[in-house]
Amino acid sequence: MTDTPTTPEEFEAVKRRHGARAALYAVVAGAFCYPETDRFAELTAADAVESLREAAERLGVGDAAADLAAALTDPELDAETLADGYDALFGLPGDDGEYPVVPYEAAYTVRDDLSAKQRRIATVSGLLEAFDLDRADGFHERHDHVAVELEVMQVLAARRAVAEADPDAGGEARSLELAEATVLETHLADFLPGLAHDLGAAVEEGDVSRAAADVYVAAADLAGELVERDRARHPDPPEADAANGGEPA
């Protein structure tokens, strides 16, 4: 946990820090969504890439963000290439019927335990409901999809940017901080490393273009660095029962 700001300058610094976090979580969440033409244009726009670099420098994760920025501005990358890469990695099963990379948390944290898997997905759904969030109409993935969980972090960070810059919003800021800690420790901490490992292996073994592979690998690396950095700054979340799908005991 960080020290409570007391001066206008400290409140402004906190606001900028959480705003930078929100910006970076937005980028990595967007990178793991299917790259429709409009989404691809937003992700690779020059001002978006520059904002990515600026936010990363503010947080001290410039190297990881530089790799993603370079991948997003690769002249060989276009929407079709990235979509083909998405399908090859996340969207289409191989000859053995298995997906090269499973983008759902429960596949890594509770694996084949169906009851625990349902509870795990329900905990993410509960977070979405608690903070009045919902998936976009065109997004049809499960609630434990990596893009959804990263977007939850984006929204929580954006709300902290407002709440922690307000001297009178201490209770709300604390609630948001604990919600972030829960997402980080209970969901993303065990999920992202496994996803990144499978992604790296699939890129090495599969038929994925270099331009698309670079985007997904760099996005996973940046997301992992953000999560580890945030975990180091957070209080412990409410205790969760691992046998109960990660729900609070």
Image: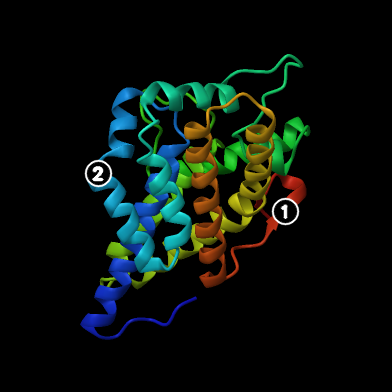
First of labels 2, 1 by sequence position: 2
Q: Residue furthest bottom?
A: 7
Mark 2 is surrounded, within 10 Å at the Cα level, by few (under 14), some (14 to 19) or many (20 or more) other residues, namely: some
Q: Is residue 99 visible?
A: yes
| Vertical placement of residue 20 versus 205, above or below | below
Give percent across and percent down for residue 155.
37, 50
Q: Which residue is mark 1?
A: 241
Scheme by which the image is coloured: rainbow
Q: Which residue is mark 2?
A: 46
Badge 2 element: helix
On the rendered structure, is 178 left or right of 138? Answer: right
Q: Residue at x 54, y 61 (%)?
A: 181
Residue type pointed to by label 1: Asp
| Vertical placement of residue 134 versus 59, above or below | above
Badge 1 element: strand
Quadrant assignment, res 239:
bottom right
Give percent across and percent down for residue 46.
24, 44
Residue type pointed to by label 2: Ala
User: Which one is nearer the viewer's eye here, 135 or 170?
Assistant: 135
